Amino acid sequence: MTHSGRSIVVHVALPLPLPRLFAYRTTAPLPPGVRVRVPFGARLLTGLVMPAPDDEAERVLRDIAEVIDSLPLFDVDYLAFLAFVADYYHHPVGEVVFSALPPSFKQGRVRGDLPRGLALTAAGKAFDPALFGRAERKRRLWAAIGAHPVLPPAAIAGLGKGFARTVKELMAAGLVERAALPAVWADAAAGPPLRDDQRVAVERIGATSGFAPFLLFGVTGSGKTEVYLHSIEAVVRQGRQALVLVPEIGLTPQLVERFARRLGLAPGVLHSGCTPGERARVWEAAQDGRMPVIVGTRSAVFVPLKALGLIVVDEEHDASFKQQDGFRYHARDIAVLRAKRAGVPVLLGSATPSLESYRHARDGRYTLLRLPHRGSGRAQPAMRLVDLGREPVADGLSPSLVKALAVRLDRGEQALLFLNRRGFAPVLFCPECRWHAPCDRCDARLTVHLARKQLRCHHCGRERPLPSTCPQCGHARLVRLGEGTERIEDALRRQFPAARIARVDRDSMATRAAFAEVVRRVHDGEVDILVGTQMLAKGHDFPRLTLAAVINADQGFYGSDFRADEQLFAQIVQVAGRSGRAELAGEVLIQTHHPGHPLWQPLLRLDYEAFAGLALRDREMTGFPPYMFCALLRAEAKDADGAQAFLRQILALQPLPQGLIAGAIVPATMARRAGFFRAQCLLTAERRTLLHGWLRDWLPQVRALPQARRLRWSVDIDPHSLFF
């Protein structure tokens, strides 16, 4: 903040794709971190006052129109953290700052009340549930609310589909009311006793003071969540707060309920499925220190916490933690940075750690904590390959898989079939003229969705009616090639007509409530066979599930990305981890056309460290992370040559120093998507400072080009994938 005559100059971050702060006049001092409304062109925008930059070349524009906050939303240290993140990712600071705010605060919302949940009224507590008669939903909701002083919204969502209406009915009857969520509940439930390896992990984490990064490397079913719970409990007892990041929305309801039951507190929930009001109230309570535990997906890494004591990143290897458009940050990496700046421990957990984290642990930069065994003496599932070159397959089902499913149905056990491809078939093909159904906007084929009688592009969303004859030659018989989850479900219903089958993918699970309802049905024994995509692979604990099958494991071999093997290994280990988690023995079948592939040997032993050793040697030889630091330059244009021409132009603006390598300018893996032609170029360097120093000098020159405003382009720091 500087003085200019009688007026005071303040520097404001605006949510605009412009890499600078904007100077405005005011007559009274304003502390950094308060929001203001300022004129920008013909518009009034909400901005945030920032500390004055070192250079003040940007001069005064106009007067501030309104001051929104009486107190700062962020302190100076947190604003410095956000500015550092913006600089690291070479992203406009205003957009980074506003990504740390809930949506309604970006529009100028004033601070609100405590987060609210549901509680029984006096009449509700005295009510006889027998009077509900056959209204099972009312009985379940009444019991769930009565089990806690105040039930948080996330726990209500976890009950399943259709309970919003039931809430209104119980409120209208005077049995239920809205109530503020207390920071701490009355009673905490005791958990199972810790095993020796879990106890060692908890003690190591609890004994640290200051910043300490831990990698909790535990096989599926080894009790990583118990380590999280004990570590969080210790932090909360000290009057501090814990931030827990999870990769998927679908994992939050069960995790929140488990945390609430075990810790005796109401965790705050932050993810894209929350309403703007919910997100704002949780954000405020976290910032004020009224909410000891926050559980959220990727964007929750930015929530301000008054007394941060611990950060946990569950499934730290998961690609969902990387934002793939706009502000392309990695939540795991920011979590480590935030813990370092705050001087607190950060706990990264996974059964298949990212190679970056594993290398850090192997080299001593992270403390490695191992949980090598499943709990209660439970053995790892038996792993078996099914050679599709030797077994005939009908609609994706091999004889070995059909036999294994029949055994489970006879025993009253459950099975999971995993295929990471939704729809009925990925290709509609004419055997007469060789036509296949293409997307007219992407270099991709349209997927058959038989139930909806549609062809759909899974890349741009284009939809067309399913033709009955070939549009090109009129042939009457079109062939549906390949399998999707819809086809597998159809084949299972014909093979096992009495079986209760549930399909879980983005088509069948349109809402969180629908997914929660399927999870409930599985737990209650109302489902025999689950068919689904990666929504099913993570974090779920189904005690009677004893068979997990990977329908088409070879999909991962055909990827062009340097992480393809790593992601396939992690995905199959996650699927395998759903089998045999209770006292019943588990089995995993992997259908493949390539039984001799070297990936299978460590995978069949579930030996991640053997795989990681081989993968790290390959990465070092080929010059990929974690041995090199990367930035991926991308461009998209409406004409076929525009993107590549733009990349050639901008790379010629400034010479590359020794040690910084620009790869070939090539079309993206999918060269045309949603009507845009796309190209990319990978920059690599052995030293991070060399890469970022060059980018800082180069990017202003790119932004100054007229062509830079005529097409789409981006710089992705530490890209998780080269598939674009």
Image (cartoon, rainbow, N blue to C red):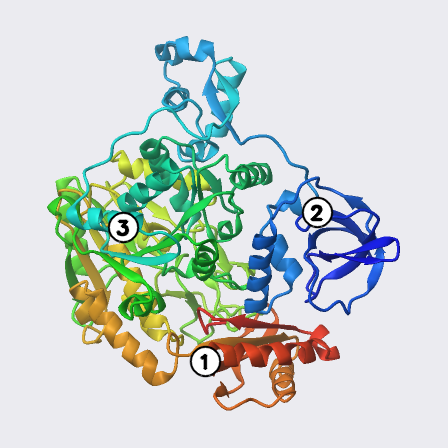
> Residue 166, image x and y in percent?
47, 24
Q: CA distance from mark 1 to mark 3?
A: 53 Å
> Residue 564, image x and y in percent?
35, 71
Q: Identify residue type, mark 2.
A: Arg
Q: Residue at x 44, y 38 (%)?
A: 292
Residue highlighted by disc 2: 35
Q: CA distance from mark 2 to mark 1?
A: 38 Å
Q: Identify residue type, mark 3.
A: Leu
Residue highlighted by disc 3: 492
Residue 395 seen in this snapshot: no
Q: Are marks 1 and 3 in contact (CB under 8 Å)?
A: no
Which tag, 2 or 3, sits closer to the chain's start?
2
- The answer to which image quadrant residue 701 occupies is bottom right
Residue highlighted by disc 1: 687
Q: CA distance from mark 2 to mark 3?
A: 57 Å
Relative depth, front residue between 439 and 244: 244
Q: 397 above or below 703?
A: above
Q: 636 above or below 261?
A: below
